[in-house]
Image (tube, grey):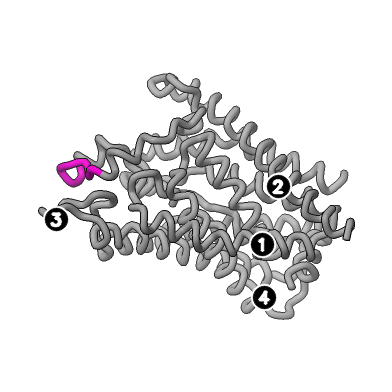
Amino acid sequence: MKTITKLWIGLGSLAVLSPLGLYLPEKFKAGDAWGEWGPEKIKELVGYVPSGFQKVSSMWNAAMPDYAFKGWGEKGLGHLSLAYIVSAGVGIVLCFGGVYFLGKLLVRKKTLK
Amino acid sequence: MHIPDGYLGPVTCIAGFAAMVPVWAVASNKVKNNLNAKQVPLLAIGAAFSFVIMMFNIPIPGGTSGHAVGAVLVAILLGPWAATMAVSVALVIQAMLFGDGGITALGANCFNMAFILPFVGYTVYKIISNKSSIESMRRVIAAGIGGYIGLVAASLCAGIEFGIQPLLHHTATGQALYCPYNLKVTVTAMVGEHVLFFGWVEFLATALVVKFLQKQEPALLQIGTEVAK
């Protein structure tokens, strides 16, 4: 088997297994990563929402927040797992594409010189 | 370790980008000069690997969760500058499309995870593996320890960035404007959880893939010794 095929199989397997990254924290009652809380949680932790934080924290509207589809926040783990796998697939394709494009552009510049 | 928008004030955000601009410039140059066209797909796979491995959140039971980054693995395969490029692209996509890590904090996040992490980890890997053969167990251990120390170093940087916020930005009455915790709290939390838990996740991810490649594709491990000049 070609090396690149093997690596793609590895990436595909990781994408399919990725919902483990949702399921395990849920199962072991672990919360967000440290320092990645939303405004409600900050208020709970320190008693107020810092005003700069309030302004900046919601300025960016991601297309697939938290690796889920918009409005799926309240759906069950099954739906979220599906969205997670789709996110993994999208992310893998974009990362591969982005670096492939950048890399080819740079390496080609060299051969042109 | 993806610092969201709102935790870092303008000074730290701008410093993060200011630090990364020259790093990105050198990384582009190094990739241009050291990699050949056949190695570009491998680097692209490395970026995709880093992206997906970061989705595997591992819980500290009843506590926080965290994950590996895979940056040291990419550095071992194609050199630390190439790793900077691969992980930066993964972080940009995570921030823009998935809201994981802030847009304003992107410079700082890249500094921690795409610069400090691969360079510290790779240096440790080089020192420990020294001139051992590509297929030796020593390289597997060296890769693991490199991953561990790299991630801990990155967490220390993140802890410092969080912790200086109350000093830099606060109201007249002493309320924080951004991250409300001081250095002692942030560094203890960030470094502590990575020393005890998440560093080992990076250890395993890095060591296992190197072990797997030794068995399956030893030629890939050979590239790293040639391109990382």
Q: Nearer the viewer, residue A87 or B99?
A: B99
Name the residue tied to disc 1.
Answer: B27
Looking at the picture, do discs 1 and 2 lie on one chain? no
Q: Position of residue A77 (x, y in %)?
A: 45, 25
Q: Secondary structure at mark 4?
A: helix
For label 3, the crowd category at 10 Å Cα-Cα, with few meaning under 14, some 14 to 19 and many 20 or more, is few
Work out whether residue B200 can be spotted: no
Q: Earlier in the sequence, mark 3 or mark 1?
A: 1
Q: From mark 1 to mark 2, how far is it between C-alphas?
A: 12 Å
Circle 3: residue type: Gly
Q: From mark 4 to mark 2, how far is it between C-alphas?
A: 28 Å
Q: Secondary structure at mark 1?
A: helix
Q: Is residue B118 above or below residue A64?
A: below
Please state the chain letter of the residue tagged with numbered disc 3 in the rendered image. B
Q: Which residues are magenta?
A: A44-51
Q: Is residue B160 above or below residue A21?
A: below
Looking at the picture, do discs 4 and 2 lie on one chain? no
Q: Is residue A48 magenta?
A: yes
Q: From mark 1 to mark 4, how far is it between C-alphas?
A: 24 Å
Looking at the picture, do discs 3 and 1 lie on one chain? yes
Work out whether residue B182 can be spotted: yes
Q: Is residue B142 above or below residue A28?
A: below
Name the residue tied to disc 3.
Answer: B174
Q: Position of residue B37 (x, y in %)?
A: 85, 53
Horizontal arrangement in the rendering, residue B73 relative to residue B99 (left or right): right
Name the residue tied to disc 2.
Answer: A99
Circle 2: residue type: Val
Residue at image location 25% in from the left, 56% down from the top: B169
Q: Classify residue B203 by image quadrant.
A: bottom right
Name the residue tied to disc 4.
Answer: B129
Circle 1: residue type: Ala
